[in-house]
Image (spheres, helix red, strand yellow):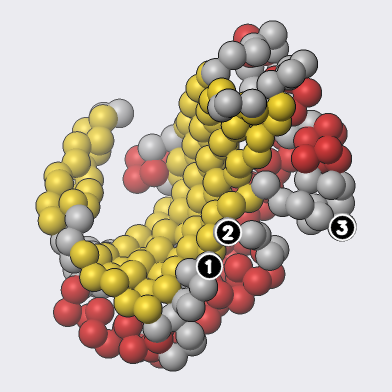
């Protein structure tokens, strides 16, 4: 469902490639293609990056190694593509224009990648969302805006009127083929309570699966999750109702 005033402030997809498929050397071929679609502001950095995950039982061992990262922005910095070792991230930041516009951005990047390498060795996909909104502290009730006691938010939070954190998750990506995460924080400002909710829906990609089909499935899961934790008051008072 589309709303008049979306609370979504950022949405991004991570494409995890097979080891050594997307190397820093290939960035020189990819970045000019990305610049062709209007993302001409290029930044180069070298942060620490998690690499080499190994699963032993229910534990994931991770190795940390430095690797170059390239960021390509459009002119108003509402669109961003990030390249790192075996990872590509497609971001949409700021006022959310709708899923169709995000898909248009994602598909254009995918087309550029396929032009360079028709067979993309994508092993996993992850869709992330960040929602934010603020409400006055006076007469604030968490359950007015979060569906406390519903399918996602535990009823333990029903009477909460103070800052809080909720963290939920299930599945190990490589061991179970999927991972789902929901995090919510409530913080007190000078006059308002500020709420932030982040979600991540990740899935391993089997041989023959189409990337965009998997992305649409993750988006459907993400949308169901969003509708499950908001209330009618959030839909109307915060988001202005459906378009």
Report how far apart the C-alphas of labels 2 and 3 lie in the structure.
Answer: 19 Å
Which element is circle 1 on? loop
Q: In front here: 89 or 124? A: 89
Q: CA distance from mark 1 to mark 3?
A: 22 Å
Name the foreground residue: 126 vs 142: 142
Task: Check contact, mark 1 vs mark 2: CB within 8 A.
Answer: yes
**In this picture, residue 138 sits left or right of residue 214:** right
Residue at the spot 51% in from the left edge and 22% down from the top edge: 165
The mark that comes first in sequence, 2 or 3, is 2
Spatial CA span between label 1 and label 2: 6 Å
Q: Does 216 sit above or below residue 178?
A: below
Residue 229 vs residue 55: left or right? right
Q: Residue at x 39, y 44 (%)?
A: 173
Q: Quadrant of residue 60?
A: top left
Q: Are marks 1 and 3 in contact (CB under 8 Å)?
A: no
Is any atom of residue 141 visible in this view? Answer: yes
When the figure is inspected, residue 166 is found, relative to residue 208, above or below; the finding is above
Q: How many neighbours does mark 3 have within 10 angstroms: few (below 14), some (14-19), or many (20 or more)? A: few
Q: Which residue is mark 1?
A: 78
| Kind of element beneath mark 2 | loop
The image shows residue 37 at horizontal and vertical percentages of 49, 87
**Residue 80 percent across, percent down from the top left:** 44, 68
Say above or below: 222 vs 237: below
* Vertical position of residue 32 compared to residue 66: above or below: below
């Amino acid at each position: 469902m589309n709303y008049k005033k979306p609370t979504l402030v950022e949405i991004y997809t991570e494409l995890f490639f097979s080891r050594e498929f997307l190397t820093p050397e290939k960035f020189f071929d990819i970045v000019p293609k990305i610049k062709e679609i209007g993302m001409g502001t290029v930044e180069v950095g070298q942060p620490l990056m998690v690499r080499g995950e190994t699963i032993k039982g229910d534990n994931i061992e991770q190795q940390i190694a430095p690797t170059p990262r390239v960021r390509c922005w459009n002119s108003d910095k509402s669109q961003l593509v990030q390249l790192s070792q075996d990872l590509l991230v497609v971001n949409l930041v700021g006022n959310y224009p709708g899923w169709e516009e995000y898909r248009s951005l994602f598909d254009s990047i995918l087309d550029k990648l396929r032009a360079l390498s028709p067979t993309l060795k994508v092993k996993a996909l992850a869709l992330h969302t960040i929602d934010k909104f603020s409400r006055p502290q006076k007469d604030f009730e968490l359950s007015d805006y979060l569906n406390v006691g519903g399918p996602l938010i535990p009823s333990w939070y029903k009477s909460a009127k103070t800052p809080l954190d909720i963290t939920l998750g299930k599945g190990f990506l490589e061991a179970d083929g999927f991972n789902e995460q929901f995090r919510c924080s409530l913080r007190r400002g000078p006059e308002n309570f500020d709420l932030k909710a982040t979600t991540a829906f990740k899935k391993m990609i089997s041989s023959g699966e189409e990337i965009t089909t998997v992305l649409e499935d993750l988006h459907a899961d993400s949308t169901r999750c969003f509708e499950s934790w908001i209330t009618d008051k959030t839909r109307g008072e915060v988001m202005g109702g459906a378009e």
